[in-house]
Image (tube, helix red, strand yellow):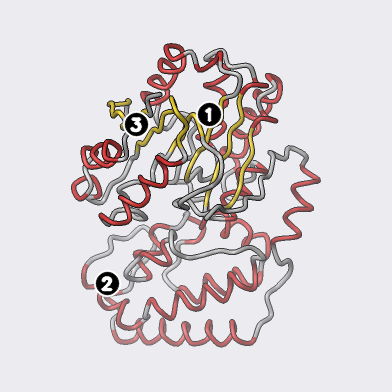
Amino acid sequence: MEQHLTIQPPVTDPAGTERALRLILATGELDDPDLRRRIGRLHERFAACAATAPLALWAPGGVITPEIRSATALLIPQGEVRAAFRRLLRLSLRLDASLEGTPLRRAPSWPDCAGRLDPPFRTASPARLLERLAADDRLRRAFLFSLYVPRRHGARFDRYPEQAAFLHRWLRSSGSPRRERLRCLDLACGAGEGTYALARLLLDAGCHPDRFRILGLSSESLEIFAAVHGLFPHDPPRQEAFRLVREELRAQGGLSRIGFATGELTAAECGERYDIILCNGILGGPFIHERDDLVRAVAGISRRLAAGGIVLAADRFHEGWKRSVPPERIGELLAAAGLSVAAAGEGIAGIRNG
């Protein structure tokens, strides 16, 4: 079934970004009885943990031992922590937002979760953090962006330099820059660094801006907002890097050739076929690693690929994902989908001959 996508062009006007922010974020203090009740209960949980297992308390910067993890998981149940933060999100954010890809969903205990948050939000007590966020909308804005666009995800325009060099050579050798139209898709684009970097690469390879179009697609609405507006209130250096890259692309005529949308990454059909598909950081990691899910995802991606097109997959997965889904497995799936497979820098490529 074809999915309908609302494509948003990059916005570089600060006033326009501020107007858009007011539409998606609640301002002022969050005065909600249910949230207050949940925070109060977590204060009680933390006090009980401090009283019964003081040696098991974690502090920011400390090592999370098995004793700390087990005691905290028992006395401050992560399910209650998640429920309180879900309530905060519903009150704060007028966009669809899931905890699925965040530490709040994946961490087994509060210390594990807090240790993966950006430094200003690492606190021993989840109740204390929730209290601060409910009271201060500027802090809450920074927290929301840090939760969905964390510094550890991407934050570089040259994340896969060897893959970029491979694609540059492929473009020059395949004659793609001389095609009438070059359609590109960046699946799981995150905050858009790879999408903007692809536009720079196409221009460098000799593609005229009138002859290419790039769509960045993510399932997370706040990631797409950050990509569209180049907004990172929790990370000023990243925001400045975006400003410089987008100014460079605008001067070359490439910025208007980029669009972003929120959508299902593994939808069976999206209507259009693409000449270049990037699916970096998606296949074989935390989100898509079960055999049936991988087969379905690769099949869907290959159906989106035009004749003569190329799909590129690279990653920087840790935590054992490469052992469970080695690159060879991704190559086998691409080959089974009818693509010619080649090593491509930090990852692998599948090419549809024709």
Residue 251, located in which quarter of the rendered image?
Answer: top right
Image label count: 3
Give the camera-side residue of 7 and 94: 7
**Label 1 amino acid?**
Ala
Crowding around mark 2 (Cα neighbors within 10 Å: few <14, some 14 to 19, many 20+) is many
Residue 350: mark in rendering: 3
What residue is at 58 percent from the left and 33 percent from the top? 214
What residue is at 46 percent from the left and 82 percent from the top? 42
Q: Give the CA separation, mark 1 to mark 3.
A: 20 Å
Residue 68: mark in rendering: 2
What residue is at 34 percent from the left and 53 percent from the top? 288
User: Residue 125 location, x and y as percent?
Assistant: 44, 73
Say whether residue 207 is left or right of residue 107.
right
* Residue at the limit of the structure toward the front, as seen here: 354
At numbered mark 1, what does the secondary structure look like: helix, strand or loop?
Answer: helix
Residue 197: mark in rendering: 1
User: Residue 28 location, x and y as percent?
Assistant: 73, 69
Of pointers 1 and 3, the one earlier in the residue sequence: 1
Of pointers 1 and 2, the one earlier in the residue sequence: 2
